[in-house]
Each structure stands twice: as C-alpha cells, then as structure tokens.
Image (tube, grey):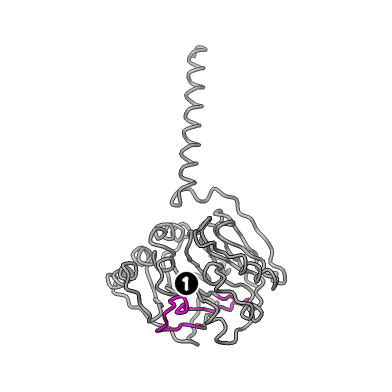
Amino acid sequence: MNKNQNKKSSVAGSIITILVLIVMAILGANGDGLYSTQAQNVEQVDNLENVTIHTGEGVISKIPNDGNLRVYCLDVGQGDSILVVNENKTMLIDASTNQMGSRVVKYLKDLGITKIDYLIGTHPHEDHIGGLDDVIKSFEIGKIYMPKQQANTKTFEDVLDAVKSKKLKISAPTIGEKFKVGNAECEIMSCKNNVENLNDCSIVIQMNCDGVKYLFTGDMESEVENSRNWNQVDILKVGHHGSKTSSSKNFLEQIKPKIALISCGEGNDYGHPHDVAVKRLEKIGAKIYRTDKDKTIMVLQEKK
C-alpha cells in the first residue's frame, strides 16, 4: 500500500470513528437509546450493613438469581415506576407516563423480567398509569391492584382495554391486606376512594424484608399522611415527587427514614422536588436520592 492509500485509509478510519461517536451520543441522549453508558455508583447505608444504594443507568443489567432483594426507582422522567424483585418474584408499582411506557418495558426486558407477579397502579393519574397498558401488553401479568376510584381519561381507558384484551381483572385492595414478593412481606396501608383529590387515593404499601422496612407512597399527600399512625421505616419512596404538599413534618417524624427516594424529571415544570420537602427530609437525617440527578436508583439488600 502506498503513502496516498495509507493517508486515505487513515482519513476514512477517522471519519468512521467520528460518525460512530455521534450516533452513540444521539442514542445516549434518547430515552430509548443506550441508557447504560453511565457508570454505577455505590454507597453503603449507615446502620444497614447489608443494604447498598446503586445509582446511574449502569444498574440496568440482567438480574442474577442470587436471592437478594432489589428495589429499582426507575429513571422515567416526571413520573413514577418502582420495581421490586426478590426470589424470582416481581412487583411493579406504576409505569410513568404514556410517553415513558416503552422505556419502562425496555428497562424490564433488559433486567431479564418476563412476568410481573403484582402490578400496582397507585392512582389514576397519567404520570403513574400512563405506561401500564404497554407493560400489560408486553409481559405475563399476575395480580393487578388499582383503587376503585376511576378517571374519565383516555389513559385510564387504555389501561382498561389492555386488561380486557388479556382477559385479566383488576382488584381493589383493602387496608391491611397482605401479600408476599418472594420473602418480602407487603401490606396495604392506605387506599382511599371517593375523594376529590386523586392523589389521596394512592395505594400505599409497606414492605418488610429481613427487618428492613420500605414504604411506597404513590402521590399520597399530607391529609392522608396525618390521618393515621405510621411505623418507622428505613427506606421511603417520597410521595408526589417531592411536592411540598407531601412529606409533612409529623409524618416524617413518625417514620424517620434513613433513605429517601424521589422520582422526578430533570428541569420539570412543577419544581419537584420542592425545597420545603427536601429540607424536611434533611432535617430528620434522611439521605436523599433523586432520579433527575442520580438517574435510576437501585436499593440492593443482600441476604443475611
């Protein structure tokens, strides 16, 4: 090969490299693209020796069959989607917006999920149930929990149509109802009906696994928070994306979480999480993780 040929080959190689980098950058910026390019960060939780917090899209990889409990707070923009996996059993709490439904499905498939044993639609707002129809269509579904309260929206109708198409049914849970996700024991703590504020209809679930307690709150607001007594928990999925109308002082002083998970979109129009809520969480000593900054968050609880 002569010098001119070498030069042409080098230029061509450089052009190809640049094009590949451009394509990767574009895909990486796309919510449905190469989201796993970010490194995974790991932090130990004080006083919980078998619990670590992993952040970054690098946490989305096939789940090993090791019997450990994993709780994923998925990066789904301005919405909620929480996945719990233990002993090959799964619970998905919400599936974010209509727009994010395909991303939720991709996350689940990349994690190796084939069945959702418990599918929870906490309340009929689009940023929580928008992607449920995509999930229902894409996976084998066990039991579906949603509150009795309905909504006159196309989003809600799409969920009902997906349920009907697979000949499934929706169950409205009752307070005190219990079920298990692997070894993790779950209990329905709240699920109100016939209220004007749909956020207050949210299905609230407390989960206990080997003494570590979790609380998943949907969009529960202060009126419900202050309507009962609560048990102390270790890890809280913060209500209503960190809105100031949730995470009330009395509620947080009762549950005293060590870890607070906030699902919200970067630069969202609502200003979530609000400074007021963040300060309340900081005051009780909670370590805060948020999807707008940390991307997908995984709580890994190893078997004792």
Q: Quadrant of residue 46?
A: bottom right
The answer to whether residue 207 is magenta is yes
The quadrant in which residue 169 appears is bottom left
Residue 276 in the image, given as x and y percentages of width and height? 62, 68
Horizontal side, residue 191 vs residue 98: left or right: right
- Coordinates of residue 87 in the picture (x, y in percent): 52, 71
Q: Is residue 205 magenta?
A: yes
Would you place residue 47 above or below residue 134 in this image?
Answer: below
Q: Is any part of residue 72 visible from this angle?
A: yes
Residue 96 pos. (x, y %): 44, 64
Which residues fall within the magenta stretch? Answer: 190-215
Would residue 211 be seen by someone viewing this image from the given angle?
no
Vertical comparison of 241 with 250: above or below: above
Q: Which residue is mark 1?
A: 91
Q: Quadrant of the C terminus?
A: bottom right
Callout 1 amino acid: Met
The mark total stands at: 1
Residue at image position (46%, 58%) is 107
Residue drawn at (46%, 45%) of the image: 27
Q: Residues within 10 Å of mark 1 (few under 14, many from 20)?
A: many
* SS type, badge 1: strand
* Residue 173 image offset from top left, x and y in percent: 43, 83
Q: Residue furthest right?
A: 47
Tell which of 100 and 213 is nearer to you: 100
Q: Residue at x 61, y 69 (%)?
A: 277
